[in-house]
Image (cartoon, grey):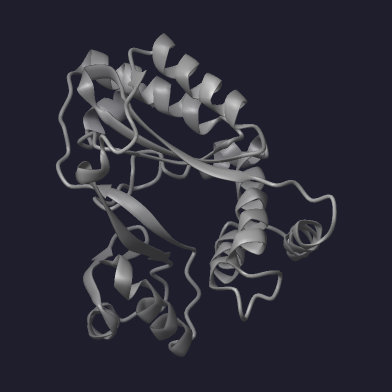
């Protein structure tokens, strides 16, 4: 498992494992399709959501031909129409889960999510029940290579970031309303993020016992493996020792 950042969800990216099954590219293609249809068309320069989706696809090494094919398919007749939907749920130990999906069949997706939760000690909550627990924040991840830590940090703070964390990767965190400012500053510095997104960050993480943690990890893996699921957020307090036991 990759190094942990306090701003990233446990197992938010399971790059190597997912790539083998094509999961990452499937989710990226869906995001590109949704961006084309809802963000203003196939022109990357005039469609900020598409520009972000393409940047993320490049950051995860999606071939250029695949990206162009996805844009062309989404902008033409016959491309799939995906509905965006979210689910708020509770899991083992009373943890909170916020699940974002893009689907061409919402009935199927609802049924699948409900089934996963029921089999692993969870249940769906009412819409809006977790809104107060998660705050939207902009998260940018970049390679550490070639960056002067102090200089880069000051550039990001001047652009609106409220935290910059250096680890295996660099994480830049900002308020949702400053997302565009950070994007523009990175372009000005000619830096391309490995990943950039608006994420739902928990305001209060929850520590759970080992048994609940095991159930949670299993539930998270199953939900993330569903092709309709784009992202899963949670409020579980990161426990490196327990993760190492499960690795």
Considering only vertical position in the picture, is 6 above or below 51? Answer: above
Q: Is residue 77 left or right of residue 37?
A: right
Q: Quadrant of residue 37?
A: bottom right
Tell me, yes or no, if residue 84 can be seen here.
yes
Q: Quadrant of residue 22?
A: top right
Residue beneath the point at 41% across and 28% down: 220
Outermost residue on the bottom side: it is: 188
Residue 32 locus on image (x, y percent) = 64, 58
- Numbered marks: total: 0
Residue 86 locus on image (x, y percent) = 44, 39
Outermost residue on the right side: it is: 77
Residue beneath the point at 59% across and 25% down: 107
Residue 38 locus on image (x, y percent) = 60, 61
* Image quadrant in which the C terminus is located: top left
Q: Is residue 153 left or right of residue 110?
A: left
Residue beneath the point at 85% across and 56% down: 77
Residue 195 locus on image (x, y percent) = 47, 61
Considering only vertical position in the picture, is 59 above or below 98? Answer: below
Q: Is residue 232 left or right of residue 155?
A: right
Outermost residue on the front side: it is: 127
- Frontmost residue, 135 versus 194: 135
Tell me, yes or no, if residue 173 can be seen here.
no
Residue beneath the point at 52% across and 25% down: 110
- Frontmost residue, 17 versus 33: 33
Considering only vertical position in the picture, is 141 above or below 183? Answer: above
Q: Quadrant of residue 217?
A: top left
- Frontmost residue, 53 versus 190: 53
* Image quadrant in which the N terminus is located: top left
């Amino acid at each position: 498992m990759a190094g942990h950042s306090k701003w990233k969800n446990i197992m938010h990216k399971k790059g190597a494992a997912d790539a083998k099954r094509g999961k990452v590219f499937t989710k990226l293609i869906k995001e590109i399709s949704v961006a084309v249809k809802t963000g203003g068309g196939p022109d990357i320069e005039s469609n900020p959501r598409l520009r972000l989706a393409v940047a993320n696809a490049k950051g995860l090494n999606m071939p250029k031909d695949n990206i162009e094919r996805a844009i062309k398919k989404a902008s033409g007749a016959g491309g799939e129409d995906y509905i965006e939907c979210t689910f708020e749920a509770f899991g083992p130990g009373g943890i909170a889960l916020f699940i974002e999906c893009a689907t061409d069949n919402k009935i199927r997706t609802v049924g699948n999510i409900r089934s996963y939760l029921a089999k692993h000690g969870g249940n769906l909550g009412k819409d809006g029940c977790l809104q107060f627990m998660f705050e939207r924040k902009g998260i940018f991840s970049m390679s550490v290579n070639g960056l002067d830590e102090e200089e880069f940090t000051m550039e990001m703070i001047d652009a609106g970031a409220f935290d910059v964390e250096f680890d295996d990767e660099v994480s830049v965190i900002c308020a949702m309303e400053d997302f565009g400012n950070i994007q523009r500053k990175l372009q000005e510095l000619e830096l391309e993020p490995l990943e950039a997104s608006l994420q739902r960050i928990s305001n209060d993480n929850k520590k759970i016992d080992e048994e609940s943690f095991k159930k949670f990890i299993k539930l998270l893996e199953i939900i993330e493996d569903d092709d309709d699921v784009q992202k899963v957020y949670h409020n579980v307090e990161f426990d490196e020792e327990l993760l190492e036991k499960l690795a």
